[in-house]
Image: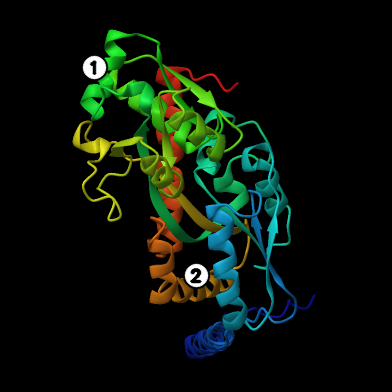
């Protein structure tokens, strides 16, 4: 019987040569892949194939809409395509947010988010489209402005935050503060003030800031947290500015103290930010962040809105994401302590 052929191991030199060849081939493949990716990323992302749409969750004419339209005008030239503004009000901005969350994640459908995004996530987390941190992705922060704590003629004796707190402590549950809706930052600012000062208040929701302003100056409600653009006419009609809601004083009302000067850490502002659908590619997000930051740096544009108390911010995608996360956690904590009613 013949013996099976021997299976002697290959020579050590041949093994070493084979391994070196395999390593070289792998390194070459990785280098080619890296070069391909780098070359692709070096190419600017193009939006010229079709229009870009900015979804605004409010009716035309308000502050957020005005900022969106000014931004759209400048982005149209930079991106080489038409940038449209589409107003989709309703459901405390949830309708617009859900629309963008369902859109194709290619950067052509974008959402102008506001504090309602964080308030909805904290107070009614089961509403569609769900947690904005999962269904949307931050692009860049656009603008901010403080609210002004305004006292009307019904609070004639009150001159500052301390006086307001003393008035409310002497009349538990009588202080009523108007707001533009139960799921809005002005309402939450009032609730946060009540929580920090340990007073009882009544929040009075309106369909918008204009009617609330009329009732404050008419003495039908005691006061409100109002945007600067709404507060200035109220001040001209006899109301008084007790404080601003931002951490620092406002440049447009430098003589008015901040609530934080009485309650350190108090910081509630109106802000707007640009968001894209989740899973939008990184190069697209980076391109949008860059062109929006460039537009927001336009001093002519900044000066125009500065007169209305609006400050352009800009910054990184991460900074907008951190703002959203910080606000959601803050409103969740307030809800646990105060058990706010949403009606």
What residue is shown with label 2?
289
- In the picture, residue 234 is in which quadrant? top left
Mark 2, Cα crowd under 10 Å, few <14 / some 14-19 / many 20+, is many
Q: Nearer the viewer, mark 1 or mark 2?
A: 1
Q: Residue 166 carries which label?
A: 1
Residue 298 in view in this figure: no
Residue positioned 40% across, 34% down in the render: 330
Q: Position of residue 111 (x, y in %)?
A: 62, 56
Residue positioned 44% across, 55% down in the render: 320
Residue positioned 54% across, 75% down in the render: 287
| Residue 2 horizontal side relative to residue 36, left or right | right
Secondary structure of the residue carrying numbered label 1: helix
Q: Position of residue 63 (x, y in %)?
A: 53, 54
Q: Which mark is residue 324?
A: none
Q: Is residue 247 above or below residue 240?
A: below
User: Which residue appears farthest toward the right when viewing the image?
Assistant: 1
Where the C terminus falls, by quadrant?
A: top right
Q: Distance between the residues labelled 1 and 2?
A: 46 Å
Secondary structure of the residue carrying numbered label 2: helix
- Does label 1 or label 2 sit earlier along the sequence? 1
Q: In this view, does 194 lie above or below 281?
A: above
């Amino acid at each position: 019987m013949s013996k099976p052929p021997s299976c002697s191991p290959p020579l050590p030199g041949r093994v070493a040569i084979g391994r070196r060849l395999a390593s070289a081939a792998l390194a070459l493949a990785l280098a080619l892949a890296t070069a391909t990716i780098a070359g692709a990323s070096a190419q600017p992302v193009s939006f010229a194939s079709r229009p870009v749409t900015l979804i605004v969750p409010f009716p035309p004419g308000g502050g957020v809409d005005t900022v969106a339209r000014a931004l759209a005008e400048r982005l149209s030239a930079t991106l080489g395509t038409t940038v449209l503004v589409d107003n989709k009000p309703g459901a405390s901005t949830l309708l617009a947010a859900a629309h963008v969350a369902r859109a194709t994640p290619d950067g052509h459908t974008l959402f102008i988010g506001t504090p309602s995004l964080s308030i909805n996530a904290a107070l009614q987390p089961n509403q569609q489209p769900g947690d904005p941190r999962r269904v949307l992705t931050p692009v860049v922060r656009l603008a901010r402005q403080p609210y002004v704590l305004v006292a009307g003629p019904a609070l004639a004796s009150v001159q500052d935050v301390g006086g307001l707190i003393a008035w409310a402590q002497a009349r538990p549950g009588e202080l009523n503060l108007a707001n533009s809706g139960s799921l809005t930052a002005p309402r939450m600012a009032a609730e946060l003030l009540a929580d920090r000062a340990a007073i009882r208040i009544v929040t009075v929701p309106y369909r918008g800031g204009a009617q609330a302003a009329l009732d404050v100056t008419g003495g039908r409600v005691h006061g409100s947290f109002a945007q600067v653009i709404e507060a200035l006419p109220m001040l001209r009609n006899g109301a008084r500015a007790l404080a601003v809601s931002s951490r620092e004083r406002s440049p447009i009302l430098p003589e008015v103290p901040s609530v934080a000067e009485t309650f350190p850490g108090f910081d509630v502002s109106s802000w707007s930010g640009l968001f894209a659908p989740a899973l939008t590619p990184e190069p697209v997000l980076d391109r949008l962040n860059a062109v929006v930051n460039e537009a927001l740096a336009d001093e002519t544009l900044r000066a125009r809105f500065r007169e209305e108390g609006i400050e352009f911010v800009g910054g990184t995608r991460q900074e907008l994401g951190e703002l959203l996360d910080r606000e959601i956690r803050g409103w969740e904590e307030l809800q646990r302590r105060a058990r706010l009613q949403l009606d």
